[in-house]
Image (cartoon, grey):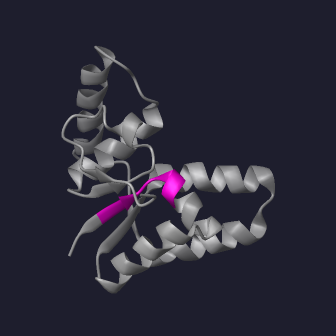
Amino acid sequence: MAKYCLDSNVVSDILRGDPEVMCRFKAAEKNNDELFIPSIVYYEIVRGLKAAGKTRKLTAFQFLYDTAKPLYLDRDDLTTIKKAIEIYIRLHKGQMIEDNDIYIAAISMVNDCTLVTSNTRHFGRVEGLKFVNWRG
């Protein structure tokens, strides 16, 4: 059984019904893999759908979020924030990525999940992050 943390672009693919992503998503469900959605992804998806007035997709996302397991930015011991700082320091010496993505990477790593993202070039900069692209 695998543990997958879904990035915003994958959640968007699921909401659009992308055939390749949906096939892998359904296979993960069938395998009883654990599917997680970080609170940062919740923020990115909900703000975008609300700003665009997409109420049906917002309802669909809420159903997806309710069936997945949430992963929050941090626990009481600041483990995720400390991991995010570590990632930032390493990336600061090369090519940076956005703070939200640093947080998503840190959440995935701290919770021992494989990040599902189509932005592999971007997340490939994060040393030690396990990731997979369901688009191909």
What residue is drawn where x is 30% and y is 73%?
A: 34
| Residue 55 x %, y % | 77, 67
Q: Quadrant of the N terminus?
A: bottom left
Q: Describe residue 83's horizontal placement relative to residue 102 as left or right.
A: left
Q: Quadrant of the C terminus?
A: bottom left
What residue is drawn where x is 76% and y is 49%?
A: 51
Residue 122 picture quarter? top left
Residue 112 picture quarter? bottom left
What residue is drawn where x is 78% and y is 52%?
A: 52
Q: Residue furthest top?
A: 93
Q: Residue furthest front?
A: 136
Q: Describe residue 42's horizontal placement relative to residue 79 as left or right.
A: right
Is 28 situated above or below 111? below
Whether 6 is among the magenta residues is yes
**Nearer to me, 72 or 111:** 111
Residue 19 picture quarter? bottom right
Q: Describe residue 17's horizontal placement relative to residue 72 as left or right.
A: right
